[in-house]
Amino acid sequence: MADTDDDTSGARFRPEVPAPSHTFPLKGCGGLDWGMQSRLARIFRPATSRTVMLAIDHGYFQGPTTGLERVDLSIVPLLPFADALMTTRGMVRSTVPPASRAPIVLRASGGPSILKELSDEHVAVSMEDAARINACAVAVQVFIGGEFEAQSVHNMTRLVDAGQRYGIPVLAVTAVGKELTRDARYLRLATRICAELGAHFVKTYYCAEDFDTVAAGCPVPLVMAGGKKLPELDALTMAYRAVQEGAAGVDMGRNIFQSDHPEAMIRAVAAVVHESVKPHAAYEKFMVPKAQAQD
Ligand code: R5P
């Protein structure tokens, strides 16, 4: 029954208390629609505006990668420690428990396998399906300098247009071909092109020199890509430097799931990213006890 006799008093409106005007803290994202900001706030922890994304999308072009043979066994137990899971719709529907709280960043480009020219990708997921999956973002590979550079940029801009309609952010992943150098000059070029053409956040590699200029030149949040497996301390050092030099977090795969102690490693990465714990301290706290327990 309707509250026709509701008699709310004037005092309850608290006219003396001004309504808050919310600002959105993520770099370059203040003007986005509420749905976009809400999804980004699920990926980037509001307390730190940083993220530890766990990347397990490798199978979309290279099949069952070491550490991902059984995602149900190796990755699902890590989900409580990840701020977001970057994966494919096939893996989501087959293996990721719907009750998992980890936001999904959905791989939305693909086509060629490792046996072919990798830059020849196309859009591989509709935004409608991404919405059906409840994705918090979609990810697309952009091959600046690659053979199919313009096609991959066009994949991204099509996804950005669709994402704007649905309120789903787009993560541009800058893919560096074998023949290109991952130096600051190249990374500034690639990340800036992605942001200028509408990517809501960008994933790129770390470079030892001038990474701060890459982060500063990218007007939207930049997350550091992990790359090939390194010794844990080196990977933690790289993550530490990246966030100290302006990255809004990391999106790491092999350096987590190919570790002998993936849970300890993702917790160590989170300490480095969210608490600015120094790499040695994070290593000592999380990795050493695990290794000793094994002896
Ligand atoms: C390719 O570039 C993809 O984004 C990867 O499949 C994945 O995200 C790479 O993760 P990582 O290099 O940290 O293993």
Image: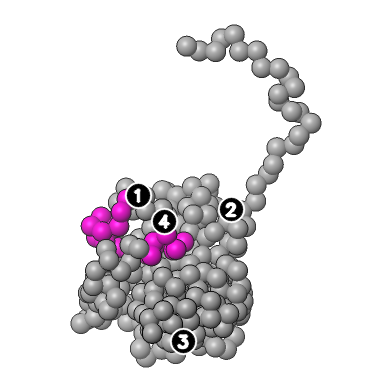
Of marks 2 and 1, which one's residue comes earlier in the chain? 2
In this rendering, which labeled residue sits more in front, label 2 or label 1? 1
Looking at the picture, how far across and down is residue 209, in whole percent?
A: 57, 89
| Residue at the spot 50% in from the left edge and 12% down from the top edge | 2
Residue name at image x 56 percent, y 74 percent: 272
> Mark 3 belongs to which amino acid?
Arg
Q: Amino acid at mark 1?
A: Ala
Q: Which residue is mark 3?
A: 182
Element at badge 1?
Answer: loop
User: Is the CB–ligand 1 distance for label 3 below 8 Å?
Assistant: no
- The quadrant holding residue 260 is bottom left
Toward the viewer: 75 or 52?
Answer: 75
> Which kind of residue does numbered mark 2 sit on?
Gly
Q: Quadrant of the C terminus?
A: bottom left
> Mark 4: which amino acid?
Pro
Q: Residue 63: horizontal and vertical position, in percent?
A: 22, 74
Question: Which mark identifies residue 31?
Answer: 2
Of labels 3 and 2, earlier in sequence is 2
